[in-house]
Amino acid sequence: MAYKDFLVRKTISDKEKQGKQDLLHTRIAPVDYEKVKSVADLVDAFGGCSIQARNIGLAANVYKKMLTDTERPTIMLGLAGPLIAAGLRKVIRDMVNNNMVDVIVSTGAVLYQDFYAALGGGHYYGSPNADDTKLRELFINRIYDTYVDEELFAEYDSMIGRFAGTLEPRQYSSREFISKLSETIDDEDSILVTARKKGVPIFCPAISDSSIGIGLTEHYYMSRKNGKTPITIDTIRDNYELTQIVVKSPGTAAFYVAGGVPKNYINDSIVMSYIFDQYTGGHKYALQVTTDSPHWGGLSGSTLAEAQSWGKVNKEANFAMAFVEPSVSLPLIYGHAYQNQFYKDRKKLQLKWSGDVLQELKIV
């Protein structure tokens, strides 16, 4: 019996036929380079494809909605992974400069490598198959296929320690400390410098886990050795400050590049809104680009749908995930928004701090 004849033996109801027609409705649209003239065009074309190309298109559409929503949600950008080594420094800097992000939560490594670059340190072509024992002898550190100068790292670590020694010996949030540290460099391509000038706060809740933390530990040691009081970074104050931004905002949107501490920290700021007798309902929009997988159960790969069960992402939220490594996915999503100028009419966010108290959050 032919397979076609076998299928005919199964009776399909009219309701099932309609359901089948509904499912077989939209055809996949192949990428057509006769129509693709820009990155924005390519990402739009991806939206008609499948697998992770479609997810890139969906994520780009979520970012468009974040930027163009008339309620003007506060966009919180989480940064993790070797983003500066990957060549994304100017992409992230331009997101800040073009009013496409309002708050940054980052790992210390991303911020330190921006600082390192601002002082003249380079990221160099390398090889993942390099002889690492030879690199060690030359004081060259490897980040997959990128090389950095360990001698400069050591110099700049100590520079951070010495800078900390010039500050009033008290507790600082990472936001306050990073803002002050950014005043020691002057590089128009720097994320730190651009964020300070644009009034975009940068939080680094795991600051100790980085070269910045190494410099601060040197400061702590030298202060104790010389009978002085060291400064300390109060990460609970970070919680307090970020949650004030959340509860004073008309809404929030999350853009996660990779995962890690920044992702969880941004999500937990939603949960912590109860401390201020408020519940925001969760992020109105959320998107993530990552290579981490959900089925291992870890936070970095956990789906944004899972976050809905915690109330971190709103039940009605518009969200998307693309399982594409950020050195590829972030420039595509940013390029789509930039070339389409979705940020052009977006109003600015102005924050006014008095110590650890957010006195005013104003859309101007």
Image (tube, rainbow, N blue to C red):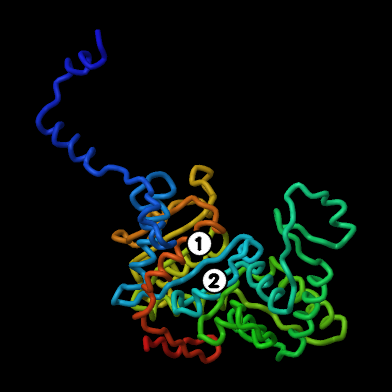
Residue placed farthest to the left in the image?
14
Count residues near mark 2 (Cα–Cα under 10 Å), then give few for <14, some for 14-19, many for 20+: many
Foreground pick, 246 / 229: 246
Residue 212 location, quadrant: bottom right
Quarter of the image with the C terminus in it? bottom left
Identity, as a three-letter code, of the amino acid under mark 2: Ile
Q: Residue 140: x, y in percent?
A: 82, 61
Q: Quadrant of the N terminus?
A: top left
Amino acid type indicated by mark 1: Leu
Residue 28 lies, in percent from the top left, at: 32, 43
Q: Earlier in the sequence, mark 2 or mark 1?
A: 2
The label number, if any, that marks residue 330 in the structure image: 1
**Vertical position of residue 21 compared to residue 49: above or below:** above
355 or 186: nearer the eye?
A: 186
Q: Is residue 26 left or right of residue 241?
A: left
Q: At which x and y percent is residue 15?
A: 11, 33
Residue 130 seen in this snapshot: yes
Badge number at residue 92 = 2
Which of 303 and 344 lies nearest the eye of the viewer?
344
